[in-house]
Amino acid sequence: MDEYTVEIKRTDVDGKTRMQTFKVPKDKVSTVLETLLYIKGYLDQTLTFRYSCGMEICGSCGMEINGKPHMACSFVLDNFKGDKILIEPLKHFKILRDLAVDIDPFFDKYKAVKPYVIRNDDGNYQKELLQTPKQFDEYIDYSMCIKCGLCMAACPIEGSDENYLGPAPLTAAWRFIADNRDQGKKMRLEIVSGAEGASRCHFAGECTEVCPKGVNPSFAIQKLRSSMIGLEFQKLFGGK
Amino acid sequence: MDESVRNLNEGVMGWAKFYRKGWNYFAFAMHRFSGLVIVFYLYLHLFVLSHLLSGPVTYNELVKTVTFGPFDSFLVLDVLLALVIFYHGANGTRLALNEFGIGLQKNKAMFIVFEAIAMVILGVFLYYAYMFIGAS
Amino acid sequence: MENENKYGITKRPMGSISRMFQAGSGLFLIFFLGVHLYVAHIDFGHPVQFFNQVIQNLRNPWWLLFFIVFVWIITYHALNGVGNIVKDTNIGEKGRSYLNIALIVIYFATSIYGTILSIVVAGMAI
């Protein structure tokens, strides 16, 4: 076979879904994103999807490819055996149209953990805040997150309870707690120790599995949990 | 957001759909399922043990019916029960170690190793526990 | 931002402690259940313990204590687990507090019943 059979789950503005099949010649495309671009260019220009950089940096083109969340741009078809490709929009997100999903709720959760360096002082410095390579290594892995939302689509708890903060926001919380320049640890721990926070994770580990950038959200959540314990005991015995 | 927007949230049934989602999902879903089975058995067990109060005859009768007959097909369910208990125990050990920060980087290897060990112990256990089948 | 409230500060967060307890009790149960399965199914060569053997076991105060602790811990682990599963289905703030009350009631009912049962059975004549 010199053609891929691409099956795409399409949703129109009225919310009706249908499966549409396209035939795409193998020698014209090398990734799923290129396949989609080929379809949009030559077969059906109404196909809607979101993409930008095409090199796994912007985090726009997350979608379910053959039932698992992947970045369309980095899903190389050479490594893929078989001719049938099933493409669906990311799970656990609201579909706007076709493969484009509404990522606003995800970013709201992301903002809820205050993903920026918090300082206690006025922020006027004569020189930069220094950091040793060791301190840098503490958080650099977690700062690789590109906010693509694949982990949110893979998380089983996110699937049954949309209020759960989710792997990426919790990882962001740990990324800034682990940063030695940050002083907002207590504030963040209070947010993630809430009813929708880190204690809802059950270590299915699917987030780590699907992450295109090798971030380990389940490890970050475990770190958060062990940091939370002190705070919880403090509050349990009446401390503030 | 208007109503035309569909939510793809899978709900509880999403847990059961682990086809193609990977072994993590399978482990997670089976852990929950086996847990619920064990809770059900726990109460069944308590119910059976409550028959101890009605004296030796009733209790021994009850126990004999489900092991030697006429309802000895319960033994098949017993094997399945042992299977889910050992599965839950092995996966639970992995999760507990994860909780204490051990092995989060090598989850899959740990899952396989723990499950393999548990299944070997299960085999040994069943071999000794069911020796009476040939004897009676 | 509307999420400010939803992910706001909880008065008495217990999530992490409860997960630690769940993990710890789980590890204990591996040991308890191992001993229990060995004693009840392998050690004496019968498929099940009949009435007399159960009573004889329970007459030993150490075994009695063992089984009572077993009941208290396994009930905790079981109901906490069921609670975790139900809480993952988006039952809301109110649902959660009702669920917690229900679980505590079931917990004490089950474990106290189990304790009384084992003590009464231990006192029965063979």
Image (tube, coloured by chain):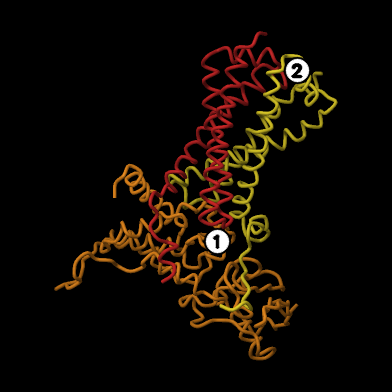
Chain colours: A orange, B yellow, C red
Going by the numbered disc 2, the residue's amino acid type is Asn
Percent across and percent down for residue A3 are: 72, 80
* Rendered view: A130 above or below A5: above
Quarter of the figure that contains the C terminus of chain C: top right
Percent across and percent down for residue B47 are: 69, 28
Describe the element under mark 1 as helix, strand or loop: helix
Name the residue located 50 percent from the left edge and 55 percent from the top edge: C93
Name the residue located 66 percent from the left edge and 22 percent from the top edge: C42
What label does residue A183 carry, if any? none
Q: Residues within 10 Å of mark 2 (few under 14, many from 20)?
A: some
**Nearer to the camera, B117 or A218:** A218
Name the residue located 55 percent from the left edge and 81 percent from the top edge: A50
Percent across and percent down for residue A162 are: 54, 63
Task: Determine which residue is flagged by label 1.
Answer: A158
Task: Determine which residue is flagged by label 2.
Answer: B60
Counting every numbered tag in the picture gives: 2
Going by the numbered disc 1, the residue's amino acid type is Glu
